[in-house]
Amino acid sequence: MAAASGAADSWENPHKIPPSALLLVLLTGFVQFHQIFGVEVNIGKVSTLTVLNGSDVMLPCTFSSCMSYSDSSFWWNFQKNKTAPVERIIFIKLTGKRPSVTTEIDRFMLIGDIKRKNISLLLEEVEFEDAGLYTCAFKNPNEADQQANSTLQLFVVSELLPVDNKLTVLIASIVGGVIGLLILLFIIKKLIMLIIKQIGKKKKECLVNSCANTQRGHYGSKADLKSPPKA
């Protein structure tokens, strides 16, 4: 009877998923979710920076993690180009409350706050040799040692080219002209409506005066028609 009942249940619910299979699907989706969205590194909307030789520049970098990032590692690498050897600039190990920072080049300084998920660097007194690719990386052991990185390119120039504002000035002039034209049309419309109103008012006054004069004329004509009084 039990076997028959089980067969009947399976017949009535042919699409019923066993709890173990459902749990397996959920765990697989959870693992894939963490693999895709677990660890991220962001250098901002612009992937290139152009700076003046001898100036200071900030290399921005932030990170995100779905889980705790205690005991994580952060570092910056430098390459002159994509085929050049990789050089370590700075290495940061998060242990306890304070991160351990190892700097390979003195002109690089960590100015980001790990607690705020910021590992930006400051490069002082930029030289032409500093031009190249800078990669910010993050590795989290709490998320199966997942690692993420992002690269920005730094250009160093002897002088900054002046910004061509002709297009901006042209657009501003066109927008200002259109706004001025709309204001002028609005004023003209108001004047025309005021003139039409005044003309209509005068016509109404003339019509009233004309009707009054006509009525007075009729009364005079009736008086004229009366016979003179007898002596």
Image (cartoon, grey):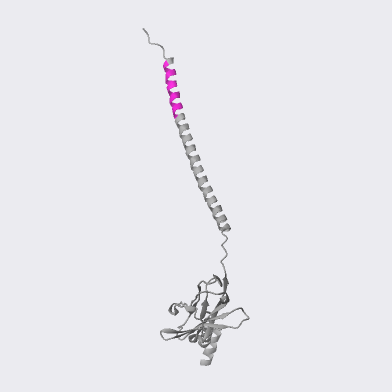
Q: Residue at x 55, y 53 (%)?
A: 173
Q: Quadrant of residue 214?
A: top left
User: Given the current orientation, which residue lies at the most extreme left position?
Assistant: 231
Note whether residue 1 is visible: no
Residue 64 in the image, given as x and y percentages of width and height: 49, 78
Foreground residue among 29 and 150: 150
Foreground residue among 99 and 79: 79
Residue 75 in the image, given as x and y percentages of width and height: 51, 82
Foreground residue among 25 and 45: 45
The number of discs equals 0
Residue 50 in the image, given as x and y percentages of width and height: 56, 70
> Which is the main secondary structure of the residues drawn in magenta?
helix
The correct choice, above or below, for 65 with respect to 6 in the image is: above
Note whether residue 186 is visible: yes
Query: Is residue 1 one of those drawn in magenta?
Result: no
Residue 57 in the image, given as x and y percentages of width and height: 51, 73
Query: Is residue 211 one of those drawn in magenta?
Result: yes
Image quadrant in which the C terminus is located: top left
User: Given the current orientation, which residue lies at the most extreme right position?
Assistant: 83
Q: Which residues are magenta?
A: 208-223
Foreground residue among 116 and 200: 116
